[in-house]
Image (tube, rainbow, N blue to C red):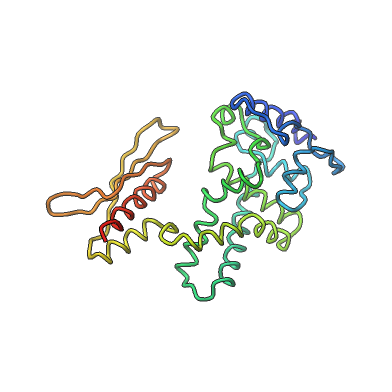
Amino acid sequence: MRVGNVDYNSAVMKTQNNQENQHNTKSAHKASGVLRLDNGEARAGDPTQELLDALGTTISPDLLVEALTHRSFSHEHPGTRNYERLEFLGDAVLELVSTETLFSAHPDMTEGQLAKMRAKAVSEWALSAVAREKLHVGPYILLGRGEMEQGGNNKDSILCDIVEALIGATFVEHGIDEARAVVHRLIDDTLAEVLTEGPALDWKTSLTVKAHDMGLEDPEYRMAVSGPEYAPVFEARAVLAHKDGDEVLGVGSGSSKRKAQLAAAEVAWHALDARK
């Protein structure tokens, strides 16, 4: 199948071969780069059909390719559409469906509690796990040469975007009812799981609440950054300020300021909890 001036089958085969060379592994769903034919016919062992089966829907070939195309690929192949518009749409659909689900299922919860649950269920961490564990979508993402060499098809941020783009593509193809069914299929178990997580829903807020309960001041975060400009590593220290100096409660690192602070807050929460 061709998209613009690109043969998608060949591009997918390159991605799969690159992954196999990097990991020296093969699996059944990576063995073939053949997609559905332009008339929609699915062949035995067709990896696209496996992806659609995991989604629980159908998406026309051109729209599916768009949902799987990263901007780095479209920059190298002018005229090829990337997933960013579909991701924008899918993000809105995902938020709507997750919100209405939580609102109906938990009538006793406050707005703040519902917001924390939704944020965790549709977070980059949660959606990238869906992409890896439910959709196995990595081999079918079209990436530019540089992004492919950097392992872009296993980056949380790209995998998260792909899930949202696939939801957006479902909405375009079938409307809200089918998109709602896909969202439920992908994240209902995550929504159920986060209900049991307690303080893990938001470590920073939970740390502040625990500090207040213990008569302590609000924890503060001291930040540092290292590594190259294209791949910075942030380090956060969760501290309590005292007259005689800062008390470091927890240290965490991550690829963003927020991730580092959440990691530090988790360590700090457990440190305070152990004092009780």
Q: How many marks?
A: 0
Position of 224 with respect to 92 (left or right) is left
Position of 155 with respect to 268 (left or right) is right
Position of 4 with respect to 157 (left or right) is right
Instruction: Where is residue 91? Give x, y as percent.
Output: 59, 54
In the rendered image, the quadrant that contains the N terminus is top right
Instruction: Where is residue 75? Give x, y as percent.
Output: 62, 33
Residue at 59% of width from left, 27% of height from top?
A: 23
Residue at 56% of width from left, 62% of height from top?
A: 192
In the rendered image, the quadrant that contains the C terminus is bottom left
Residue 174, image quadrant: bottom right
Residue 269, image quadrant: bottom left
Q: Is residue 240 above or below residue 198?
A: above
Instruction: Where is residue 253? Give x, y as percent.
Output: 37, 41
Position of 202 with respect to 131 (left or right) is left
Residue at 74% of width from left, 33% of height from top?
A: 8
Residue with the most extreme left position: 244
Residue 147, image quadrant: top right
Pick the front one: 215 or 58:
215
Pick the front one: 254 or 188:
188
Pick the front one: 76 or 231:
231
Pick the front one: 26 or 54:
26
Instruction: Where is residue 92? Give x, y as percent.
Output: 60, 58
Residue at 68% of width from left, 27% of height from top?
A: 14
